[in-house]
Amino acid sequence: MTDSQQVTARPYPFAAPDRLNLDPHYARLRRDEPLIRVQLPFGEEAWLATRYEDVRVVLGDARFSRAAGVGRDQPRTMPRQPDLGMLGMDPPDHTRLRRLVAKAFTARRVELLRTRAQEIADGLVDEMVEAGPPADLVERFATPLPIQVICELLGVPFADRDSFHRWSEAIVSTTSLSPQQVQEYLESLWGYIGELVAIRRREPIDDLLGAMVRARDENEDRLTEQELVQLAAGLLAAGHETTVTQIPNFVYVLLENPSELARLRSDPALIPSAVEELMRYVPLGAASAFPRYATEDIELGGVLVRAGEPVLPAVGSANRDATVFTDPDRLDLGRETNPHVGFGHGVHHCLGAQLARMELQVAIGTLVGRLPGLRLAVPEPEVPWKSGLLVRGPLALPVAW
C-alpha cells in the first residue's frame, strides 16, 4: 500500500477539454493506477479517484466530508475559493436545508410538471419552424426550456431570465469571469432573490420560494435569512445551468452517432433509457471538482488516504469503467443496466435529478419526434465550445432540419 508521502503529484487537469471526449488518460489510470496524486492549478494537492467503485465510496461514505474543506485551500481550477452553500455542508446542516426543498423535486411533483414542460418545448419548436432554419439550438430551445420550468416551479419571473442567467455564470465559472466579476454577479443574484423574498412577504404566493419564506418566518431555527437567499439563488442557478448545457450536449452526441439516432427515431420508447445512457456517456465536467476530505485514515484503491487529505471523484471516468459497464466507450441507447453516477451519489446526489431527467426526456423526445431531419447547419469543426467553466458544452449549436 502506498500513501501521499511516497507519491509525486501530477498536474491536473491532464489537458484542456476536447469537445465531449473523455481524456484517454483516465482509461490507463483505471487499469494501472486507480488513485493518483494530483496538483490542480489552485489549492493543495489531492488524490484523484478514477474507478467506479472508489468514486462511489468517496461520494457516499460519510468518512469523506465536504464540510471539512471549509477553511482549507481546497484543490480547484479557479482562483477564488467558492462558497458552495449546501454543497459545502455535511449532515445534519446539509440535511436540514435539503429537507426544506426536497418535496418540490420528488418524482410525483416533477411528473405533474411534465405536461407544462412539453407545452413549452412544443412552443419553442413551433417558433423555430416558423422562423425556418438555421437556428441556434442553444439560444432558441436549450436555454429557454429549463429556465422557464425552474421559473414556474420556484416562482421567479421568466421576463428576468437574461439577467439571472448571466449572473448564474458566477456559479460555474472557473476562469471565464474575473474574481471581481464573480463577486459582482453573485451579489446581483443574491440581491435579486432578496427582492423576490421581500415581495413574497408582502404578497404570499404558493410556490417554492413562498414556501421557503414561510419556513424561514414561521421557524427561524430552520433557515437564516442568508441561507434562504443563497439556497433559492442556488436552486435557480443549478436548476437550469446544467440542463441548458446538457440538452445541446445530448443533441451533439446523437448527431455524431447517426445509427443510434436512427434507432431512437424508430423507437421513441427508448427515450428514458437514452437519457440515462447520455448522462453516463457525456462527461459534463471540464475536470473533477468538489473534493471530499478524509476524516480518518482510509484505504482506497490500494492507497492509504490519510485523515485530512482531499480526494477528487472523477465521475466521468467512473461512468466509463468496464468492470461496471459493458463496452463503456460505446453509446448504447438501449443499455439495460446503467447505474451511472452522472447525478452524483450519496447525500449530495443531485437534488434536481428527477427534474433534469424529465426535462431532458421532453427535450430529446420533442426534437427527435418533431424534427426528423435535424442536423448540424455548419461543419462540425465550426461548432464553438464553452471555456473557462466547470462544465463543457457548445456555446452555440447551429442546426437545420
Image (cartoon, rainbow, N blue to C red):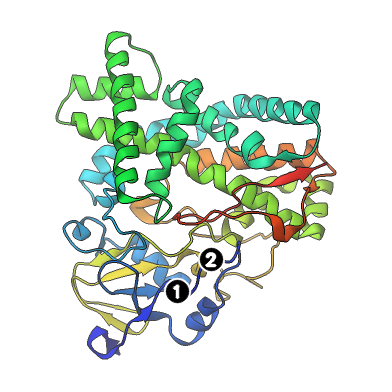
Mark 2 residue type: Pro
- Look at the picture and state if 136 lies above or below 162: below
Residue 360 located left or right of residue 135:
left
| Structural crowding at the residue carrying mark 2, measured as other residues with C-alpha within 10 Å and reported as few (<14), some (14–19) or many (≥20) | many
Quadrant of the rendered image containing residue 93: top left
Helix or strand or loop: what does disc 2 sit on? loop
Q: Residue at 75% of width from left, 54% of height from top? A: 255
- Look at the picture and state if 122 lies above or below 296: above
Res 189 seen here: yes
Between 309 and 385, the residue placed more toward the observer is: 385
Between 356 and 129, the residue placed more toward the observer is: 129
Q: CA distance from mark 1 to mark 2?
A: 17 Å
Res 333 seen here: no
Label ID, residue 159 = none
Q: Which of labels 1 and 2 is toward the front?
A: 2
**Location of residue 2 in the rendering, given as x and y in whole percent from the top left corner:** 29, 89
Which residue position holds label 2?
Answer: 17
Residue 85 located left or right of residue 125:
left
**Location of residue 71 in the rendering, given as x and y in whole percent from the top left corner:** 16, 58
Dot 1 or dot 2: first in sequence order is 2
Specify the quadrant that holds the C terminus. top right
Helix or strand or loop: what does disc 1 sit on? loop
Between 400 and 235, the residue placed more toward the observer is: 400
Residue 131 located left or right of residue 392:
right
Mark 1 residue type: Thr
Specify the quadrant that holds the N terminus. bottom left
Quadrant of the rendered image containing residue 306: bottom left
Which residue position holds label 1?
Answer: 50
- Look at the picture and state if 333 lies above or below 204: below
| Structural crowding at the residue carrying mark 1, measured as other residues with C-alpha within 10 Å and reported as few (<14), some (14–19) or many (≥20) | many
Q: Residue at 53% of width from left, 29% of height from top? A: 149
